Amino acid sequence: MFISVEGPDYSGKTTQVAVIKDYYESIGKTVTVTREPGGTEIGMKIREILVQEDSLNDPLSVTEQLLLLYTARLHHVDKVIIPALKRGEVVISDRYIDSTYVYQGLIYNHKEAIDELLQVPTLKHLISRPDYTFYYDIDFDTVLTRMAARGVSNKLDEKYAKLKELPIDAFKHHFYELNKKDPGAIKIIDGCQDMQTVKESTLEVSKAVLEAFGDIRAPYLERVLEIKSWTW
Ligand code: TMP
């Protein structure tokens, strides 16, 4: 079973990834936790370029960002995600394709390029959605409160201040639309609640999706292996 966990910065998603992992391990599952960009050695090098690119004299274009993200994703899927799923593990990725739809697609206005760039046969499996996506929904006031509580001013905060509400609205728009189309796979969790309540919601959803997993007609792994079998 492949789960992606998504949300804006300060949504608390990374803390909840640990909650999901601990829960599945407590009931005897083997879990691989991974992240994007990152997840592999090459992925971490690409992550360094992407998170620092704002400070470059000549920053990357959005198309260039996408090509780097896709290089990292291709490597990540083939070297980490598919092998772990083949071993029967639960894979949890802290960010995956929805971050690309939101950041490069909605925020940086390259919506059309996202799937278009993946139309070549050897990349088509990267369009496949995970079995489930947990989205931590927060509002801008909660972000500001959490930023103030941490009392840190780093590059990300500067970027946030510049973008104002944009990422929050883009995430909301993207996930509320997706949830309308596929409520079974897209789980919206209220990330504004206190930590204990968010944790309880996460546990409830984690339990529910595991129970429902057997009913998915074509799980992620099956779909991806099928696409690969006719495109490679
Ligand atoms: P993180 O610190 O939550 O791991 O996120 C790293 C940054 O990477 C975050 O600002 C969002 C960005 N990102 C994209 O712009 N596009 C993507 O496809 C992914 C996965 C992340």
Image (cartoon, helix red, strand yellow):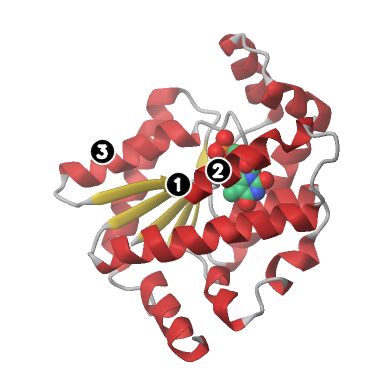
At 71% from the left edge and 71% from the top edge, which residue is drawn?
117
Give the label on residue 41, or none: 1
Crowding at dot 1, Cα within 10 Å, few <14 / some 14-19 / many 20+, comes out as few
x and y percentages locating residue 65 in the rendered image: 72, 52
Spatial CA distance of label 1 from label 3 is 24 Å
| Side of 23 relative to 81 (left or right) | left
Is residue 136 visible in this depiction of the protein?
yes
At 85% from the left edge and 40% from the top edge, which residue is drawn?
58
Mark 1 CB within 8 Å of ligand 1 = no
Q: Quadrant of ligand 1?
A: top right
Quick one: quadrant of the N terminus?
Answer: bottom left
Along the viewing direction, whichever of 13 and 184 lies nearer the viewer: 13
Hey, what amino acid is under mark 2?
Lys
| Camera-nearest label, 1 or 3 | 1
Residue 115 vertical placement versus 102 (above, below): below
The quarter of the displayed image where residue 153 is located: top right
| Side of 231 relative to 48 (left or right) | left
Spatial CA distance of label 1 from label 2 is 7 Å
Of pointers 2 and 3, the one earlier in the residue sequence: 3
Is residue 174 visible in this depiction of the protein?
no
Spatial CA distance of label 2 from label 3 is 28 Å
